[in-house]
Image (tube, rainbow, N blue to C red):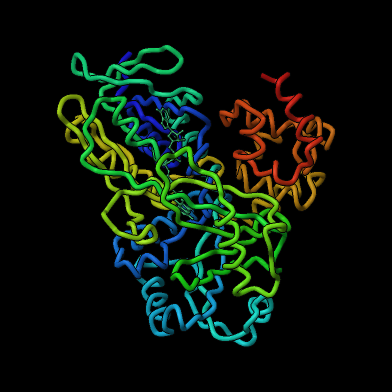
Amino acid sequence: MTYDLIIVGGGINGCAIAREAAVNGLTVLLVEKDDLAAHTSSASTKLIHGGLRYLEYYEFKLVREALKERERLLKAAPHLIRPMQFVLPHEGAVRPWWMVRLGLWLYDRIGGKISLPRSRGLKRSDTQFLAPLRRKGKGFVYSDCWVDDARLTLLNAMDAAQHGAEIVTRTALVSARRQGGVWQVELSDGQRIAARVLVNAAGPWVADVLGSAQLPSRSRVRLIKGSHIIVPRLFDGAQAYMLQQPDRRIVFAIPYQDGSTLVGTTDVPVARPEEASITEDEVLYLCAATNRYLGQQITQRDVTSTYSGVRPLYDDGASESRAVTRDYVLEMDADGPPALSVFGGKITTARKLAEEVFDTLAPVAHWRRTASTEALPFPGGDMADFDIFLSEIRANWPFLGEARSLRMVRAYGTMLREMLDGVNDIACMGRDFGGGFTEIEARWMHDREYALTAEDCLFRRSKLGLLIGSTEQIAFRTWWETLS
Ligand SMILES: Cc1cc2nc3c(=O)[nH]c(=O)nc-3n(C[C@H](O)[C@H](O)[C@H](O)COP(=O)(O)OP(=O)(O)OC[C@H]3O[C@@H](n4cnc5c(N)ncnc54)[C@H](O)[C@@H]3O)c2cc1C
């Protein structure tokens, strides 16, 4: 069989492209050398946002598109994506008041009609927002959204598969060459396959894959590491903080899991994608960034966990890492069977990117658009109202309890009805591995979500690994081995 399309890379971009192509009736194979979202797509700040600070670099098109996508994603995955309020304390020495006010005014309007509350000044009566701040002065409140980045990647892959795509993890593209009017591709499991079109969505490895396919690269990728720290909760409430730093960078402090705060990110150029681990300097930078604003002071010793990812940015020649464009660039090589490589992009704009990939390839590959993903719900996202659906789950399966039902509805949405079909009491959920994680969920991840290792379950399909103790994790790993 010859596939219409082979996609290299199971990050957000590769999975979104697989979904777009499969929805439009193409035969698609996606290969991922590790797990889905194993790299940058699980290491983001987890915001579905326009990117307020990009306005400063005149990235109006990127912000407009991203805000439009924010609206679409909120409707298509209401279980996974939720609105969040951001408190932005004023720091006149970094940016003047009028500049931030103007930026927010534009941010509220540039994406067209929005369903989230518009920005406003911080008021004396905002006691909960002000309480954690060292200086209870002026500031702003604006809205964006929060997402589980790894699960959004997964939902793209699941939806692609539901539309006929083949998703294969732990399998790398080793080499590819043009022969007989198609791409002949060698995979790490020894298989050889043929495809009419090759899409290189290898993120930080985009240049390596170009090399493996003997393709020249006109564009260059700039690898910029970003790290986050997780610390015990720094403030009460569901709001997040956007903290302007003296170097003009932005650091976010966001409520994370139950009882923690996520702080990030940094911008550090790296030479190789494998250099994605946090340094002591980054930890100190992030601690100082929140200490500057929040009353609850932290040191290195408070850090309970960290993660780092490498942004595969398009090299636009900017001198500073923070100024490099966050927009994406598509590089086409149609000198024979077409190949298209993706540089840059954001979690937020992956669907739009995928649409553009399809439309760019369509004339050369003779594809015809038959459907649109613009208003297509993601698996589990077909619900009229999140709160009503949550109440339905709680009424039907009361033994789940408040915290677990909320976590599971957020993770699986309406797919939960299927997972819990025939489950009449807690014993039916099987073994409990701690933190509310039971056998039924682990089996679902194994059977439906391409999880192949205990790690895939504990740290990407969920973040329960951050909550479950080491003894329980060992028990889970042992059980998992018996499953596979
Ligand atoms: C610190 C940080 C914070 C961010 N915050 C946000 C945010 O808040 N909001 C937002 O919208 N965006 C954010 N981003 C941007 C976003 O995370 C990335 O743009 C996006 O995840 C890139 O996805 P990708 O699919 O291109 O790359 P990846 O997720 O890295 O996927 C590429 C995949 O290709 C695979 N691969 C490589 N070579 C091969 C091969 N030969 N064969 C098979 N597979 C291969 C890799 O294993 C990898 O899984 C952030 C990024 C970083 C680093």
Point out residue 27 in the picture as x, y percentages from the top left corner. 35, 24
Q: Is residue 383 visible?
A: no
- Judge whether 263 appears above or below 8 on screen: below
- Residue at the extreme left: 335
The quarter of the image holding the C terminus is top right
Residue shown at 52% from the left, 64% from the top: 251
Q: Position of residue 364 (x, y in %)?
A: 17, 32
Observer able to see residue 226: yes
Point out residue 308 in the picture as x, y percentages from the top left corner: 54, 47
What residue is shown at x 68% (from left), y 45% (from top)?
Answer: 408
Q: Nearer the viewer, residue 11 or 438?
A: 11
Q: Nearer the viewer, residue 164 or 88?
A: 88
Which residue is more in the foreground, 129 or 34? 34
The quarter holding residue 433 reads top right
Q: Is residue 368 left or right of residue 34?
A: left
Residue 342's place in the image compared with 116, above or below, is above
Instruction: Give the quadrant of residue 190.
Output: top left
Question: In this rendering, would 126 be left or right of 277?
Answer: right
Residue drawn where x is 78% and y is 38% of the image = 470
